[in-house]
Image (tube, rainbow, N blue to C red):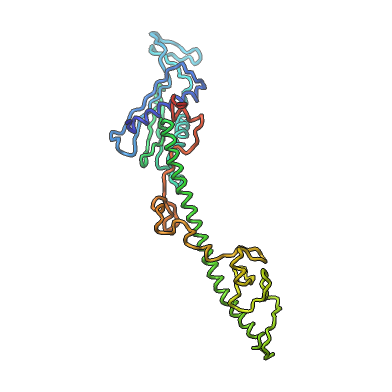
């Protein structure tokens, strides 16, 4: 099994081929570019590895044994080797920007603080030496929880397995969001039920007093039941149109449009304003997943903590569909097998 150092060097070799092709604009490059990376970290078990990059910018094409004069500047040069520039070599700044942008797509970011990178590859110091023959730089590779911040050559089965893991992480995050929303709905409906019960008790008491008053407890002194017709109190049920002659048969939903208890049990919405009835079954604990202690999935799915902050999870490295731009970087020559 290849070590992390070997995997990075293989990935960096593929990157250099892509980089040369990008800056030269030629898929079939005739020049044999000279470059190498040297490991600076002796202990490969650490989470941070550093490498020294050396990229040659010019190559020797000959040697002169006599002094020569530049026809443009008039300067004389001593006998020695003659150099030519490699075609398609970027400047130090271009190399740094291109490399960091390329490897940034494979970096692992914190799920909550997206600006914080947990695993990444970065070209830090880039310079050209006095002889102007090569570009030198220092590459830092930071690992996190076994994640590789660079494209690793995978078989298609390995790639699909990585995608499966990434989808499972994403599904866990979405499931935690759903649980949080369901808890909010549960709390809201429970509050509505409490308010509805208090209003139920108050209106039933008032309705019972009015019935007593109109049944003879008032100034008339008779025993005949008087049908109420005031604007603010509905005596007839708007569904069955029967008179509500008992306060116990009176139901007051959250919208405060009175209905009899028999019709309320058969309706899901108010017949007057069409507002959905909030009933006890609506906020039952069985309808709120992961609130039941015996749910086996509860230990496998990350839930928000006491401050409603999601548990940090590493973003999967291969979180994009397979596209032509990264096929060679990921699969190499065997991408179609």
Q: Position of residue 311 (x, y in %)?
A: 42, 51
Q: Residue at x 65, y 63 (%)?
A: 274
Q: Residue at x 39, y 8 (%)?
A: 66
Q: Is residue 54 above or below residue 186?
A: above
> Could you say which is closer to the camera, residue 244 or residue 210?
244
Give the farthest residue toward the left. 43
Give the farthest residue toward the top. 66
Q: Is residue 15 above or below residue 301?
A: above
Give the tally of numbered discs.
Answer: 0
Q: Residue at x 48, y 23 (%)?
A: 21
Q: Is residue 26 left or right of residue 141?
A: right
Write down the quadrant of residue 31 in the picture: top left
Q: Position of residue 288 (x, y in %)?
A: 48, 58
Considering the image in quadrants, where does the C terminus appear?
A: top left
> Could you say which is closer to the camera, residue 4 or residue 292?
292
Residue 234 visible in the displayed image: no
Write down the quadrant of residue 208 in the picture: bottom right
Q: Position of residue 77 (x, y in %)?
A: 42, 14
> Could you say which is closer to the camera, residue 55 or residue 81?
55
Write down the quadrant of residue 268 in the picture: bottom right
Q: Is residue 305 left or right of residue 182?
A: left
Q: Residue at x 34, y 38 (%)?
A: 48
Q: Position of residue 262 (x, y in %)?
A: 60, 70
> Could you say which is closer to the camera, residue 40 or residue 219?
219
Residue 241 visible in the displayed image: yes
Q: Is residue 163 above or below residue 218?
A: above
Considering the image in quadrants, where does the N terminus appear?
A: top left
């Amino acid at each position: 099994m290849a070590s992390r150092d070997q995997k990075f060097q293989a990935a960096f070799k593929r990157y250099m081929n892509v980089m040369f092709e990008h800056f030269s604009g030629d898929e079939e490059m005739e020049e044999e570019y000279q470059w190498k990376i040297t490991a600076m970290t002796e202990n490969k078990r650490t989470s941070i590895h550093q490498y020294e990059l050396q990229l040659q910018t010019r190559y020797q094409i000959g040697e002169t044994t006599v002094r020569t004069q530049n026809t443009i500047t008039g300067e004389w040069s001593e006998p020695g080797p003659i150099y030519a520039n490699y075609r398609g070599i970027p400047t130090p700044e271009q190399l740094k920007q291109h490399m960091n942008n390329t490897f940034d797509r494979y970096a692992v970011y914190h799920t909550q603080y997206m600006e914080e990178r947990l695993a990444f590859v970065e070209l830090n110091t880039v310079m050209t030496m006095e002889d102007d023959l090569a570009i030198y730089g220092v590459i830092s590779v930071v690992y996190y929880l076994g994640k590789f911040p660079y494209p690793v050559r995978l078989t298609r089965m390995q790639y699909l397995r990585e995608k499966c893991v990434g989808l499972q992480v994403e599904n866990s995050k979405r499931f935690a969001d759903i649980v949080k929303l369901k808890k909010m709905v549960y709390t809201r409906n429970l509050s509505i039920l409490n308010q509805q019960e208090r209003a139920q008790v108050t209106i039933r008491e008032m309705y019972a007093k009015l019935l007593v008053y109109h049944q003879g407890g008032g100034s008339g002194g008779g025993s005949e039941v008087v049908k109420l017709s005031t604007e603010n109190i509905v005596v007839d049920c708007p569904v069955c149109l029967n008179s509500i002659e008992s306060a116990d048969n009176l139901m007051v939903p959250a919208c405060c449009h009175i209905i009899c208890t028999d019709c309320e049990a058969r309706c899901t919405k108010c017949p007057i304003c069409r507002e959905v009835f909030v009933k006890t079954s609506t906020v039952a604990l069985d309808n709120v997943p992961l609130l039941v202690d015996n749910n086996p999935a509860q230990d496998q799915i990350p839930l928000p903590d006491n401050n409603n902050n999601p548990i940090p999870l590493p973003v999967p490295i291969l979180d994009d569909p397979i596209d032509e731009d990264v096929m060679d970087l990921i699969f190499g020559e065997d991408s179609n097998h």
